Image (spheres, grey):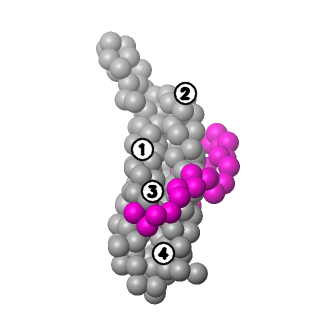
Amino acid sequence: MLKREKSIELLNKAVADEMTAVNQYMYFHFRLDDMGYDLLSSLFKRTAITEMMHVERLAERILFLKGEVEMKCSGPVEKIHDVKAMLEKAAQMETGSVDDYNAWANECAQHADSATKKVFEGLVIEEEGHLDQFETEIENMENFGANYLALQSIERSKIISAGGTPAE
Ligand SMILES: [Fe+2]
Ligand SMILES: [Fe+2]
């Protein structure tokens, strides 16, 4: 396989993972918003938007290499309703991305495509940041339990009763 084709294949696999993350995180955003947990709801929305921008970065590289952007998803959205299970699913997805992108950066180095390697390396740093945020939230839930979620609901009630709008 030509090195250009190999890079396009890896970039499209990454697009599929990112598209799956966008869908999964938006699903969590809607659910958490419905439950009134504003902080976690907006964390998932912001992260979903970042993953969408990752799709854009990958797509630009694919087009530069004269490939087609496949826009597939690597898996279905899991209909998780439990808040801690959502965070654990997200941490697991970010860990998978970090592992994959590190491995794919190495593959690109082996066929001497250093620009695609750099794209993957840049993504690794950002996915590690997401992983860190989700792990912090898991720790908060473990340390403060139901109180942690209750505080988020109370915060929303305070904002609404003061005539404000809760976080998006
Ligand atoms: Fe991403
Ligand atoms: Fe991520």
Q: Mark 1 or 2, which is nearer the eye?
A: 1
Q: Which residues are magenta?
A: 64-92
Read off the residue under disc 4.
4
Name the amino acid, label 3. Ala
Instruction: Check whether the beta carbons of the residues at disc 1 and disc 3 lie within 8 A of each other.
Output: no
- Image quarter for residue 156? top left
Residue 160 image position (x, y, % from top left): 38, 17
Instruction: Check whether the beta carbons of the residues at disc 1 and disc 2 lie within 8 A of each other.
Output: no
Residue 163 shows up from this direction: yes
Read off the residue under disc 3.
59
- The relative height of residue 166 versus residue 117 in the rendered view (above or below) is above
Earlier in the chain: of badge 1 and badge 4, it is: 4
* Mark 3: few/some/many CA within 10 Å (<14, 14-19, 20+): many
Read off the residue under disc 1.
49
What number is the disc on residue 34?
Answer: 2
Nearest the camera: 130 or 162?
A: 130
Real-space CA distance between mark 3 and mark 4, rounded to the nearest whole angstrom: 14 Å
Q: Main secondary structure of the magenta part?
A: loop
Residue 124 shows up from this direction: no
Earlier in the chain: of badge 2 and badge 4, it is: 4
Instruction: Check whether the beta carbons of the residues at disc 1 and disc 4 lie within 8 A of each other.
Output: no
